[in-house]
Amino acid sequence: MITEEQVRKVLEGVQDPHLHTSLTELDAIKEIKVKEKLLSLKLAIAQPGTAEQMQLQQEVVTALKEAGAESVGLRFEKLPDEVIAQYGSAGEEESKSLLDSTDKTTFISVTSGKGGVGKSTVSVNLAVSLARQGKKVGIIDADIYGFSVPDMMGIEERPKVVGERIHPVDRFGVQVISMGFFVEDNSPIIWRGPMLGKMLNNFFNEVEWDDLDFLILDLPPGTGDVALDIHSMLPQSKEIIVTTPHATAAFVAARAGAMAIKTEHEILGVVENMAYFESKVTGEKEYVFGQGGGDKLAEELKTSVLAQVPLGQPDHNEEVFAPSIYDETHQIGQLYKELAAQVINKTGK
């Protein structure tokens, strides 16, 4: 069992990410409780509720477990203003926000009315296909509760933190940021709306994005807090609505489209995913989820169907692990290439 003295010794080597000063020097350790196998800590930091807090949390937990702690519970509060003023740097360089680049970067929100329609699959393959066509592309996995982009793209590394800026992970020429990078052991996220909005804001303001032509936002399904935050943060965002051919999926997807229209977001079009299954033996198409859902949704939203993507699996590549990315030569990869070309054409990029 780890002792309080050992905990303090470990935290001597951990710095506040904004003040670059040891937690012990800042008197940031507000509470240490050791009870059986659980170590409970309360730490005060300069900017709680940020992406840097998540990075710090990972660093602290890893260091304490290496020192002998079996289970670590962390709570954070804000340091007193006078401590922040004493240790803060007055001459810090002004941070660059992606929200200031709306004239250069086209924001594309990929959304759906319900889960399970393949929205994230469309997001990652659209992003990779745009990058293959020479565009500078980023993707934010904004599905905070159901983050899946790192796994789908086969990403095992974590973003680097340089100074106070987070550098996204590059995969297939796409710059990637996800809540999944800041959560240990696939833990569930139990946050309320305001905290989610703050985290999304950090993804725009505290990540060192390269100059982007496109930023793809993989939104959670439906019209909840995160979708509302995105709509308010990005008045110029364009949207792609994902549905299946099933009538119910198209019906609920119409709500997401209605939100886009009410907030004056431009709908680029509809992607009908799982449109059919094509037999490799006979070439015959089977419409597993019915037909017409995509066309009906496009008609209701006064837009067009950009792609009808069949059911299928990417080819397995032992050298490049990416379970949801289609190769450019794959039949479905070709469809995503055509989808990317349409997006480039519609956005004038």
Image (cartoon, rainbow, N blue to C red):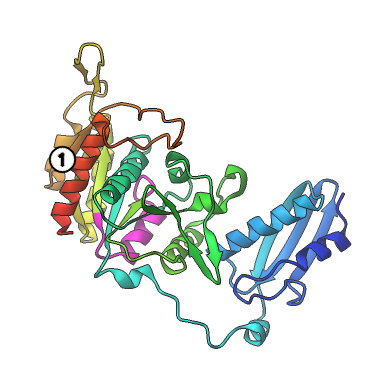
Residue at x-position 82% and y-position 61%: 7
Relative to 259, residue 27 above or below? below
> Label 1 crowding class (10 Å Cα cut-off): few <14, some 14-19, many 20+?
some
Q: Which residues are magenta?
A: 219-238
Please state if 122 lies on the left or on the right of 178 as rendered. left
Where residue 248 sits: x, y (%)?
A: 27, 32
Tell which residue pokes out farthest to the top in this image.
282
> For residue 81, which quarter of the picture?
bottom right
Quadrant occupied by the C terminus: bottom left
Residue in view at x 76 percent, y 75 percent: 27
Q: Measured along the vertical axis of the image, is residue 245 above or below residue 143?
A: above
- Amino acid marked by disc 1: Val
Q: Position of residue 168 (x, y in %)?
A: 46, 58
Judging by the rendered image, the residue that carries numbered circle 1 is 305
Q: State the SS at label 1.
A: strand
User: Residue 58 lies in magenta, yes or no?
Assistant: no
The residue furthest front is 319
Image spot of residue 121 (x, y percent): 35, 39
Whether 232 is among the magenta residues is yes
